[in-house]
């Protein structure tokens, strides 16, 4: 049996010098989730391999004679994923399976493009599906959606997997070994899944659930070591950092402390950053441990900078608390990066400037700004689906995609561009060059060019948004 995994790229990988300093245009770090599934399958099916359009093209010839092709999609890459799925269904004899967050939460749409949708995370259900396909049977048990005589069959959501101690085999991904020289690709480790919180716009918690599941600290540290060694084969990378990509690493506090102590005891000397909720900024014991373990930066999902928006979207935080948390993190010698959303029902024209002022005032080192978007399956999607401009999922990557309450879509897009321009201005670039440490100098230069590229994409959407007025 021959199995191929494909991670579609919103813009498939293209070789360009831009890739050395602009992330997310023609290059991204490949998906840890799909790599994990490929690793699980490889244990049973030796001829298993993966292509990620984040870092390479797809070897057509190799994929066309596969028995099963798994395609994992996030929302922003769904259009490309469907295009590939349609192509392989038409041109090969393979069974085509779509999975990943978007396909699972939007299975009624995804099932039109494939033979099966793999629901949920897939760790425990992927091998039973392969066995069923090899025996030319329908899969039994929860975890699948498919069409039978035109009727949609949904076998029920599977239990979330509890044994997640899998170290993804990076060598299963075509070209990965060659691509690790790019500073825009970071080693990544995902150590836990699930989050006890319930933010209205969060698709991840709907996909991974509220029950927090963790990998053993030994397994996490082994993965970190392997990942660092993998990337250190290319010694000339400007940025040597590892990103812990958990959505809420600190949800199980005792476990998080154990992992950090294991990293310290292991003697690993590396720079880490990690996503976190702002509350960790009040946990001095945790912050001390993070600093000692080598964490240089916390990526806070701040989302909004006004209390009304926090209330509207059931985010339990206030602007004052967040600012206090940021100051405490900085007091512990770590930097803060912010993830923000623009276009809430409470925001008005000028929200881009407010966001930039907040970032600059609080010395936030870098930002990711998204216009409000809604993934099917989230409470905000159900409440707002009538306000969507379209469902061209490839545009759900920062662009305005809905009618905001107090602005036009065009105005919201301009606010996003304005915030980016203020934060990544030329004077601030020079300031970073003269005042930041080496790592943040390099990061700011990279992000300066990255945001130029983001703004250029946002501007391309302006004529369409203007036509909506
Ligand atoms: S805390 Fe983060 S991961 Fe958890 S529900 Fe909110 S946005 Fe999602």
Image (spheres, grey):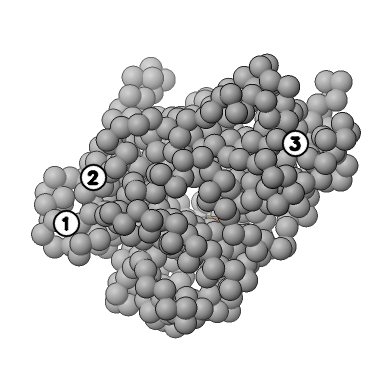
Q: Please state the quadrant of the image where ligand 1 appears.
A: bottom right
Q: Is residue 148 above or below residue 207?
A: above
- The residue tagged 2 is 448
Measured as percent of width and height from the top left, residue 429 is found at 16, 50
Tags 3 and 1 in contact by the CB under 8 Å rule?
no
Residue 360 is left or right of residue 467, and the answer is: left
Badge 3 density bin: few <14, some 14–19, many ≥20, Cα 10 Å: few
Q: Nearer the viewer, mark 3 or mark 1?
A: 3
Q: Is residue 185 above or below residue 292?
A: above
Q: Secondary structure at mark 1?
A: helix
Q: Is residue 297 above or below residue 339?
A: below
Kindly identify which numbered label has been placed on residue 432.
1
| Residue at 35 percent of width and 42 percent of height | 23
| Residue at 78 percent of width and 35 percent of height | 145
Name the quadrant containing residue 435: bottom left
| Residue at 85 percent of width and 25 percent of height | 148
**Front one among 147 and 361:** 147
Residue 376 is left or right of residue 418, and the answer is: right
Does any portion of residue 220 appear in the rendered image? yes
Measured as percent of width and height from the top left, residue 357 is found at 24, 53
Kindly identify which numbered label has been placed on residue 1.
3
Measured as percent of width and height from the top left, residue 380 is found at 58, 43
Does any portion of residue 104 appear in the rendered image? no
Instruction: Report, in whole angstroms, how far the alpha carbon at label 3 lies from the one at label 1.
Output: 54 Å
Please state, as top left, top right, bottom left or bottom right, where the C terminus lies in the image. top left
Kindly identify which numbered label has been placed on residue 78.
none
Q: Secondary structure at mark 3?
A: loop
The numbered mark, 3 or 1, whose residue comes first in the sequence reads 3
Tags 3 and 2 in contact by the CB under 8 Å rule?
no
Q: Nearer the viewer, mark 3 or mark 2?
A: 3
């Amino acid at each position: 049996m021959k199995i191929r995994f494909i991670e579609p790229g919103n813009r498939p990988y293209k070789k360009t010098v831009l890739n050395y300093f602009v992330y997310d245009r023609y290059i991204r770090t490949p998906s840890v989730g799909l790599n994990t599934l490929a690793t699980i399958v490889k244990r049973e099916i030796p001829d298993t391999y993966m292509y990620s359009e984040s870092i390479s093209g797809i070897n057509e010839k190799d994929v066309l004679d596969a028995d099963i092709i798994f395609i994992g999609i996030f929302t922003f890459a769904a259009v490309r994923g469907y295009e590939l799925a349609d192509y392989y269904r038409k041109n090969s004899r393979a069974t085509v399976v779509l999975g990943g967050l978007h396909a699972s939460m939007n299975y009624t749409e995804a099932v039109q493009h494939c033979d099966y949708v793999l629901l949920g995370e897939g760790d425990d259900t992927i091998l039973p599906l392969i066995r069923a396909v090899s025996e030319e049977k329908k899969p039994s048990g929860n975890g699948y959606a498919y069409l039978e005589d035109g009727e949609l069959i949904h076998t029920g959501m599977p239990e979330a997997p509890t044994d997640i101690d899998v170290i993804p085999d990076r060598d299963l991904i075509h070209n990965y070994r060659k691509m690790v020289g790019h500073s825009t690709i970071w080693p990544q480790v995902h150590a836990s899944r699930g989050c006890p919180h319930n933010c209205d716009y969060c698709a991840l918690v709907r996909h991974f659930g509220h029950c927090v599941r963790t990998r053993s600290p030994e397994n996490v540290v082994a993965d970190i070591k392997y990942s660092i060694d993998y990337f250190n084969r290319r010694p000339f990378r400007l940025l040597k950092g590892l990103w812990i990509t958990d959505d809420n690493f600190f949800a199980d506090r005792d476990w998080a402390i154990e992992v950090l102590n294991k990293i310290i005891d292991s003697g690993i000397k590396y720079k880490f950053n990690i996503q976190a909720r702002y509350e960790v900024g009040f946990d001095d014991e945790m912050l001390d441990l993070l600093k000692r373990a080598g964490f240089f930066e916390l990526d806070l999902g701040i989302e909004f900078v006004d209390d009304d928006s926090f209330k509207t979207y059931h985010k339990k935080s206030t602007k004052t608390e967040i600012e206090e948390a940021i100051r405490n993190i900085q007091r512990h010698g770590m930097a803060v990066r912010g993830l923000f959303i623009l276009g809430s029902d409470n925001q008005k024209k000028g929200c881009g400037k407010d966001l930039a002022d907040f970032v600059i005032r609080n010395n936030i080192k870098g930002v990711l700004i998204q216009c409000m978007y809604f993934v099917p399956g989230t409470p905000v999607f159900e409440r707002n689906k009538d306000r969507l401009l379209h469902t061209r999922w490839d545009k759900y990557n920062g662009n305005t995609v809905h009618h905001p309450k107090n602005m036009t879509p065009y105005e919201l897009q301009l606010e996003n561009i304005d915030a980016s321009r203020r934060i990544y201005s030329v004077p601030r670039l020079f300031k970073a060059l003269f005042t930041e440490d080496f790592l943040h100098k390099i990061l700011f230069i990279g992000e300066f060019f990255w945001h130029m590229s983001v703004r250029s994409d946002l501007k391309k959407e302006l004529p369409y948004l203007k036509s909506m007025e």
